[in-house]
Image (cartoon, coloured by chain):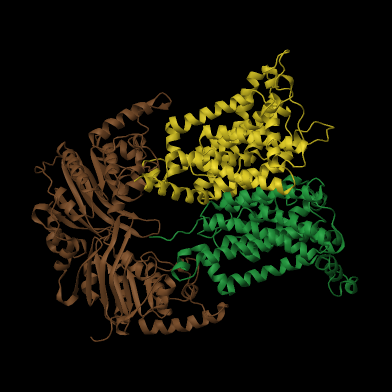
């Protein structure tokens, strides 16, 4: 028997980690002379109590679902893809090329084309580290970090030297043509009598992200590929016994991971700014790591954690607006979540395991 | 001798959870002698020595060094007490020089230069005294295994060890290297050092030790003077006169040859030759049992046949050559060729421990069309199949949704067996079928194997349990050091004879019979 | 390109290479002991802020330096706790520490100074100022050697010289002392150290702490020497370039010096792209220069040009085998 029940592993440990992160963050807020409870209330008000707040929360959550899924898929194959950021940047280039150079008749077709481009570009950026890991044993964490920086340089080059419209000083592409503009939640749900999601960036890409959660769930738990990915992740020796090729799984899992990270750019680039800007990823690739850890690499967990982080992001923006607490508080919370759920997992786990063992003995 | 024993253990006991690794063990070793400890794998030899070297704390018992009661809480204390240990897997830093490895942890002062100079001198001295020649400036990774072992011995001597423990020292050595090692040990004994030699090879015990203790299942079954015993006697003590689990089986009616292996060689990733050109064949309706002490090439043989390890030579399955390396050599292609494989280590290979029972029931066969439903896997269908198989194989608890790690060893093995047998293979490879399996399940598993044979399947059985080999096999082949020692008819042999063959002692009868078999 | 321009370029190279070198040596100690550290960036950033903040409020750059080292040590202790004591994932821990530093520095900076996440400008004794080496003025007019000595060798803040001195010191410590021998051994095969009766945990913690001190120096240099104060995210990926340099240098101190100088030169050229154009006659994209350290590192990692073999026990928590 395991040392503790399954539910404790997937629910209790993330919750305790989150609680620890929350307590520490509250201390930080106290230390800078603000009231944590008031701050929390402000965050809830700003992010969840108005439709426009939800419009932002879900916009951010869309990004985090994609990057969280990207990290989660790689985790299933026991790989740590820290390169979501770079893959998303490349995805952004893909979206920009697709939107700028192909005359789409309607957004519904454009989004398919742009998504394909984003996924391909993102996957391509994951392919090289994956290949090097599988064939040459180069540590994928280091190569993906390096690829983040190379991607940033590449993006910079394209925006400054290739895609920037003449006479513009801004390292950004031209505005995408009208037919590629995606309907926002406001366009979809707002009526004259009942204005909803006013000005909020959440758009139709959210539904693609939700669909991606379902698809990843199907992929991981319902297909033979997912079966092989998980088997490889749990035991490489077992995978070899079963005739599963480690090289093949490493490459495929990373391609999927990169494609998911790339897809994030559809939301930020096509859905929100309607042009490609330099910092469109805004660290979402790294937040994906927190989301995947928090969500225990399960698509449903990723979905919930993405919404939680979306809430934190929007709430954090509200805090920055109304109080002296900078947005960076969110970065701190995110760091603490990663620290507790990822690196200090045993610190949370060991006392809990002892507790459950004691409880069980008490029962017997 | 009237002097105090160099080392004396009294009533040592150690348990790992429910497993009693050492039960009330007492030994006494006189100074200037070589004391052998012999026993099968898992008999508790290494645990006992780890206690002596401060790696584990004994649950009970006392240790006396030169008559003094000594506590050994860690390796440092062991070193201080004059104990040196040469582990089976060397504890050397591969990209350090010999000198650097020797002074590591025993430096004089904070600067290396004086320590290295002193060690260099001392090394020259030791080399002359014990014929332990090693280039002090060579990198470990460039040394042969035999020389690396010398470095380990030198490390111990440099720390002024009076008692030297060697754990299976010849396991990785060539016969010539082993002979050299024994000359060195002999020399050390002459100089008054006390040596404890852990091995499972009878010949080594007979050749070099003064006294020998036999361990079996965590207990010390006997301690005798080497001069007053014989290999036969020791083999008997080692394997034990177990009540044979008699399996009810009719005589085999072998049919045509299913598997033919010729000149099979396996070289592992360290460049050591594990299988040294063996030939064998298995026919329909028979069980070929391969006996041998663990680590003599049987595992590699199974892995090659199962498509996990590359090799050279020939393997013919139903008359067709199988690829032994490259793209075509993997578990999937072997399964297509009609080979089912119950691996020796079900936890690392045969099962994904985190997977549920039903997921494990198709492991390796998960690509088969019958388990697919369009683009997805037919999980509901697989679960139903799994339930059926688990019921038929009496897996307890019969819950397909439980993770493999939550089943007992015997029930885990039944899951693997159910999967492999039910695929109706032409050849079943089965390694250590009952390792870590409770008595009740052993009987069931044995019955299943015999039943499969009676259905006309070919079975290749590898086991380190002699009684299992004896009760199941229709033919027995013995492997030693990557070679086939010979073949025996189970009806015409006994544990004593097989035990000798497993220890590398062969006679002409063996070769004769193989030629004619 | 005339001689003076070249000297200026090399002078900039040295100034930009210094933080890379310090961080690279920091990583060297940690990784040689088997603890991967992708949190160099975070420790540098935190140290940059604390050193600037304390230098500003006390007026003493040395107190600032101490504060920088102090916070870097705190973060190192967290990394040690996660990766040594609790046997957690070293990479995740490093990443979390970098993020934590990124957030906390701005948060505290805003709270203390209310200048949008920066510290006020540092002046006078609150900065490490250039020091003129002996005879620099006197020799200035000697042809060739004079300008070389005056422009390139003299006139750097003390931390530059400390960083350069740390290269032979590190080499000496690693390859000539007992501590160095054990440190390298614990990163290659901790069991060899353990069976020799030496504590793996103590060794690894000391390596991680040395890493903290050096990251503290690197961060302090950024905020109090290279620049005059802290600004948000001022490390700008230098911790990762240092990591790249470490791999490029194959975890060796002297190679680390050459690697960081090379990467420093790339950074210097990024500021003066016109120099390459005039020297080579071709226009080189500044982005390519910025990405070169990373590209070179990937090539090295892939083993196409020489193989970078990391310490063999790197990244793995040590568990005594049964």
Name the outermost residue toward the bottom.
B2
- Residue B243 in the image, given as x and y percentages of width and height: 13, 55
**In the rendered image, which quarter is residue C55 located in?**
bottom right
Corner quadrant of residue C29? bottom right
Q: Is residue C187 left or right of residue B509?
A: right
Q: Nearer the viewer, residue A355 or C268?
A: A355
Q: Colour of chain B?
A: brown
When the figure is inspected, residue B157 is found, relative to residue A87, above or below; the finding is below
Question: On the rendered structure, is A68 left or right of C235?
Answer: left
Q: Colour of chain A?
A: yellow
Instruction: Decide if residue A119 is in sight here.
Output: yes
The percent position of residue A226, horizontal first and vertical second, equals 45, 34
Q: Quadrant of residue B503?
A: bottom left
The quarter in which the N terminus of chain B is drawn is bottom left
Whether B169 is drawn above or below A99: the answer is below
Residue drawn at x 36%, y 82% is B130
Q: Is residue A92 above or below residue C312?
A: above
Furthest toward the top, the residue is A193
In the shown orientation, is residue C161 left or right of residue A261?
A: right
Whole-percent x, y for residue A313 in the image: 68, 36
Left or right: residue B441 compared with residue A212: left
Residue C170 % position (x, y)? 64, 69
Indicate the colour of chain C. green
Give the mark count.
0
Q: Is residue C16 visible?
A: no
């Amino acid at each position: 028997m395991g040392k503790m029940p399954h539910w404790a592993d997937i629910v209790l440990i993330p919750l305790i980690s989150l609680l620890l992160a929350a307590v520490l963050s509250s201390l930080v807020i106290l230390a800078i002379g603000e009231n944590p409870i008031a701050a929390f209330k402000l965050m809830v008000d700003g992010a969840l109590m108005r439709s426009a707040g939800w419009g932002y929360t879900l916009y951010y959550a869309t990004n985090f679902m994609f990057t969280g899924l990207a990290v989660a898929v790689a985790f299933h194959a026991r790989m740590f893809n820290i390169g979501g950021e770079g893959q998303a940047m490349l995805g952004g280039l893909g979206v920009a090329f697709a939107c700028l150079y192909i005359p789409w008749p309607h957004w519904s077709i454009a989004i398919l084309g742009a998504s394909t481009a984003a996924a391909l570009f993102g996957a391509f950026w994951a392919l090289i580290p994956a290949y090097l890991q599988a064939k040459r044993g180069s540590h994928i964490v280091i190569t993906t970090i390096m690829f983040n920086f190379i991607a940033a340089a590449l993006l910079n080059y394209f925006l400054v030297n290739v895609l920037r419209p003449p006479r513009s000083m801004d390292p950004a592409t031209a505005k995408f043509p009208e037919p590629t503009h995606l309907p926002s939640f406001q366009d979809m749900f707002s009526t004259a009598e009942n204005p909803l999601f006013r000005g909020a960036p959440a758009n139709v890409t959210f539904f693609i992200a939700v669909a991606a959660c379902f698809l990843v769930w199907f992929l991981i738990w319902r297909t033979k590929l997912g079966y092989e990915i998980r088997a490889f992740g749990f035991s490489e020796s077992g995978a070899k016994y079963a005739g599963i090729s480690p090289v093949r799984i490493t490459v495929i899992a990373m391609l999927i991971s990169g494609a998911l990270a790339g897809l994030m750019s559809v939301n930020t680039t096509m859905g929100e700014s309607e042009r490609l800007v330099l910092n469109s990823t805004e660290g979402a690739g790294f937040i994906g790591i927190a989301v995947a850890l928090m969500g225990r690499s399960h698509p449903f967990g990723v979905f919930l954690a993405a919404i939680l982080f979306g809430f934190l992001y929007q709430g954090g923006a509200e805090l920055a607006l109304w109080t002296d607490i900078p947005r960076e508080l969110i970065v701190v919370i995110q760091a603490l979540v990663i620290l507790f759920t990822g690196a200090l997992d045993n610190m949370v786990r060991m006392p809990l395991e002892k507790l459950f063992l004691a409880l069980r003995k008490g029962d017997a | 001798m009237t002097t105090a024993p160099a080392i004396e253990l009294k009533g040592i006991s150690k348990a790992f959870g429910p497993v009693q690794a050492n039960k009330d063990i007492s030994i006494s070793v006189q100074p200037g002698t070589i004391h052998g400890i012999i026993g099968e794998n898992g008999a508790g030899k290494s645990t006992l020595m780890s206690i002596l070297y401060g790696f584990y704390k004994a649950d009970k018992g006392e240790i006396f060094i030169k008559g003094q009661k000594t506590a050994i809480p860690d390796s440092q204390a062991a070193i201080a007490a004059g104990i040196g240990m040469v582990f089976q897997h060397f504890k050397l830093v591969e990209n350090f020089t010999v000198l650097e490895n020797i002074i590591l942890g025993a430096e004089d002062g904070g600067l290396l230069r004086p320590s290295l100079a002193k060690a260099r001198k001392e090394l020259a001295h030791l080399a002359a005294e014990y014929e332990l020649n090693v280039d002090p400036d060579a990198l470990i990774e460039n040394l042969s295994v035999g020389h690396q072992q010398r470095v380990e011995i030198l490390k111990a001597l440099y720390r002024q060890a009076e008692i030297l423990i060697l754990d299976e020292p010849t396991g990785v050595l060539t016969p010539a290297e082993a002979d050299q090692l024994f000359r060195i040990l002999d020399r050390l004994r002459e100089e008054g050092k006390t040596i404890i030699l852990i091995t499972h090879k009878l010949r080594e015990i007979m050749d070099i030790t003064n006294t020998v203790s036999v361990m079996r299942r965590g207990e010390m079954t006997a301690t005798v003077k080497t001069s007053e015993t014989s290999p036969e006697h020791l083999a008997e003590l080692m394997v034990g006169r177990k009540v044979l689990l008699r399996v009810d089986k009719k005589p085999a009616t072998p049919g045509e040859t299913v598997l033919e292996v010729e000149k099979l060689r396996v070289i592992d990733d360290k460049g050591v030759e594990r299988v040294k050109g063996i030939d064998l064949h298995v026919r329909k309706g028979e069980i070929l049992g391969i006996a041998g002490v663990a680590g003599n090439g049987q595992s590699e043989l199974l892995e090659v046949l199962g498509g996990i390890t590359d090799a050279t030579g020939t393997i013919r399955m139903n008359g067709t050559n199988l690829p032994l390396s490259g793209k075509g050599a993997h578990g999937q292609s072997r399964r297509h060729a009609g080979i089912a494989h119950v691996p020796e280590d079900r936890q690392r290979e045969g099962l994904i421990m985190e997977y549920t029972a039903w997921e494990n029931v198709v492991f390796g066969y998960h690509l088969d069309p019958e388990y697919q439903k369009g683009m997805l896997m037919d999980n509901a269908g697989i679960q139903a199949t799994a339930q059926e198989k688990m019921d038929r194989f009496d897996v307890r608890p019969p819950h397909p949704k439980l993770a493999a790690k939550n089943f007992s060893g015997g029930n885990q093995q039944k899951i693997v067996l159910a999967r492999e047998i039910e695929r109706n293979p032409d050849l079943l490879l089965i390694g250590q079928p009952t390792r870590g399996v409770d008595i009740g399940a052993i009987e069931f598993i044995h019955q299943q194997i015999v039943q499969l044979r009676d259905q006309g399947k070919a079975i290749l059985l590898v086991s380190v349990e002699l009684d299992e080999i004896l009760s199941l096999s229709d033919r027995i082949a013995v492997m030693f050091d990557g070679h086939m020692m010979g073949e025996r008819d189970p009806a015409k042999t006994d544990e004593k004879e097989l035990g000798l063959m497993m220890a590398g002692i062969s006679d002409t009868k063996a070769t004769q019979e193989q030629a004619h078999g | 390109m005339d001689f003076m321009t070249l000297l200026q370029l090399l002078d900039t190279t040295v100034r930009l290479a210094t933080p890379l070198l310090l961080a690279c040596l920091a990583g060297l100690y940690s990784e040689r002991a088997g603890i991967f550290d992708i949190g160099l960036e975070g420790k540098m950033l935190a140290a940059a802020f604390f050193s600037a903040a304390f230098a500003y409020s006390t007026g003493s750059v040395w107190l600032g330096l101490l504060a920088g080292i102090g916070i870097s040590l705190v973060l190192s202790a967290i990394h040690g706790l996660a990766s040594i004591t609790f046997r957690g994932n070293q990479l995740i821990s490093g990443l979390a520490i970098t993020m934590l530093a990124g957030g906390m520095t701005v948060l505290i900076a805003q709270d203390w100074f209310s200048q949008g996440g920066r510290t006020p400008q540092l002046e006078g004794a609150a900065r490490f100022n250039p020091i003129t080496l002996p005879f620099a003025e006197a020799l200035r007019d000697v042809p060739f050697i004079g300008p070389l000595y005056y422009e390139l060798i003299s006139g750097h803040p003390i931390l530059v010289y400390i960083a350069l001195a740390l290269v032979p010191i590190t080499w000496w410590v690693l390859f000539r002392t007992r501590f160095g021998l054990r440190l390298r051994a614990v990163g290659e095969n901790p069991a060899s150290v353990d069976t020799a009766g030496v504590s793996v945990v103590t060794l690894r913690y000391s390596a991680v702490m040395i890493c903290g001190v050096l990251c503290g120096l690197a961060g302090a240099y950024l905020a109090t020497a290279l620049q005059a104060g802290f600004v948000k995210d001022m490390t700008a990926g230098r911790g990762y370039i240092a990591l790249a340099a470490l791999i490029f240098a194959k975890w060796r101190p002297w190679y680390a010096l050459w690697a960081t100088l090379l990467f420093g030169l790339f950074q210097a050229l990024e500021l003066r792209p016109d120099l390459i154009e005039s020297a080579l006659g071709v226009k080189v994209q500044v982005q390519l220069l910025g990405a070169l350290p990373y590209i070179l590192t990937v090539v090295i990692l892939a083993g196409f040009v020489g193989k970078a073999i990391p310490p063999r026990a790197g990244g793995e928590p040590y568990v005594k085998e049964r």
